[in-house]
Image (cartoon, grey):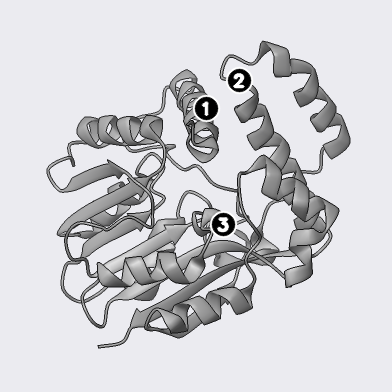
């Protein structure tokens, strides 16, 4: 049986890589697969998000880094450049994993990087000193189960950094826009900050720092209804199938949720109890 989440990210990965190729991106450049952030007031831009994250949690000793939802491995390049001892990236998409390996090889960092196609809830090989998730846990059906699995792969006292879209409250999952996002992006529900706090505590993590990045989310000004109609019109012509169209339509729904104050974008740093 085909995994709808894998289908979604395989299609999105093919489209994004094709667009990157048209831009003639250099090795290690333009690998991000996430929302745009405004760098106003010295905050992190989309391209520099990992570098900003590392300033919050980078250990004194070169760490072994675990990336939950690695995409094309953007975080691998910044982690290795900063001196990571090793890096393991996980994704549910085989397309993303193949391209991440290709990008790491082209950049000459493949000796310290590995990428695996697997569920975030499956046992994770090795021990790690720092875990990262950027816009990945939205798809976790059970946050406590997923974070407990991550905790088992970490050395005691290690930090985990979560940069995630969170619903402002539990009612957002049943809101018409929330329900549409869940359907288009193959989620089970939209997790709230309270859900994250409970799941972190249950998994043995202690929350140390929270940064609200919601005001930095860059919402395009173009008419969303017009963009949605255009996407529906080109659906029959889409080379990568309806899953890619659904991904972009889901993105438009997410913009509306942010515009209506129903989503918040937060960076949390938590530490596994010794």
Q: Circle 1: is it few (<14), some (14-19), or many (20+) Cα within 10 Å?
A: many
**48 relative to 208, above or below:** above
- Residue 62, quarter of the rendered image: bottom left
- At x 23%, y 30%, the residue is 106
Q: Position of residue 237 (x, y in %)?
A: 68, 11
205 or 55, which is in the foreground? 205
- Where the C terminus falls, by quadrant? bottom left
* In this view, 200 is above or below 180: below
Q: Which residue is mark 3?
A: 138
- Distance from Cα at disc 2 to Cα at disc 3: 23 Å
Q: Is residue 162 shown above or below 176?
A: below
Q: Residue furthest front?
A: 1
> Which residue has dot 1 on it?
11
User: Element at badge 1?
Assistant: helix
Q: Is residue 111 visible?
A: yes
Q: Residue furthest left?
A: 111
Residue 175's tag is none
For numbered disc 2, what is the local secondary structure?
loop
Look at mark 2 in the image and give the residue it sits on. 241
Q: In what element is the residue under mark 3? A: helix
First in sequence: mark 1 vs mark 3? 1
Q: Are marks 2 and 1 in contact (CB under 8 Å)?
A: yes
Task: Give the percent coordinates (x, y) of residue 93.
Answer: 41, 37
Determine the residue positioned at 35% across, 81% down.
271
Q: Is residue 231 left or right of residue 76?
A: right
Closer to us: 46 or 262: 262
Mark with earlier residue (2, 1): 1
**Crowdedness near tag 3: few (<14), some (14–19) or many (≥20) residues, C-alpha within 10 Å:** many
């Amino acid at each position: 049986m085909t995994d709808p989440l894998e289908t979604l990210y395989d299609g999105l990965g093919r489209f994004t890589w094709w667009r990157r190729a048209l831009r003639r991106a250099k090795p290690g450049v333009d690998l991000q697969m996430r929302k745009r952030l405004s760098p106003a007031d010295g905050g992190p831009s989309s391209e520099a998000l990992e570098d900003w994250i590392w300033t919050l949690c980078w250990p004194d000793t070169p760490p072994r880094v675990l990336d939950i939802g690695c995409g094309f491995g953007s975080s691998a390049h910044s982690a290795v450049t900063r001196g990571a001892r090793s890096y393991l990236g996980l994704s549910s998409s085989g397309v993303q994993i193949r391209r991440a390996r290709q990008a790491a090889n082209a950049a000459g960092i493949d000796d310290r990087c590995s990428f695996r196609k697997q569920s975030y809830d499956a046992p994770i090989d090795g021990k790690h000193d720092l875990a990262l998730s950027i816009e990945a846990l939205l798809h976790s059906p059970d946050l406590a189960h997923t974070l407990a699995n991550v905790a088992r792969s970490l050395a005691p006292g290690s930090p985990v950094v979560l940069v995630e879209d969170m619903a402002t409250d539990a009612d957002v999952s049943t809101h018409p826009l929330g329900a549409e996002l869940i359907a288009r992006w193959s989620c089970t529900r939209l997790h709230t900050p309270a859900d994250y706090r409970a799941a972190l505590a249950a998994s043995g993590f202690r929350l140390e720092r929270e940064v609200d990045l919601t005001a930095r989310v860059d919402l395009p000004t173009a008419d969303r209804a017009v963009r949605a109609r255009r996407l529906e019109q080109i659906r029959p012509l889409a080379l990568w199938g309806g899953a890619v169209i659904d991904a972009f339509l889901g993105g438009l729904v997410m913009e509306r949720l942010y515009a209506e104050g129903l989503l918040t974008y937060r960076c949390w740093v938590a530490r596994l109890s010794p």
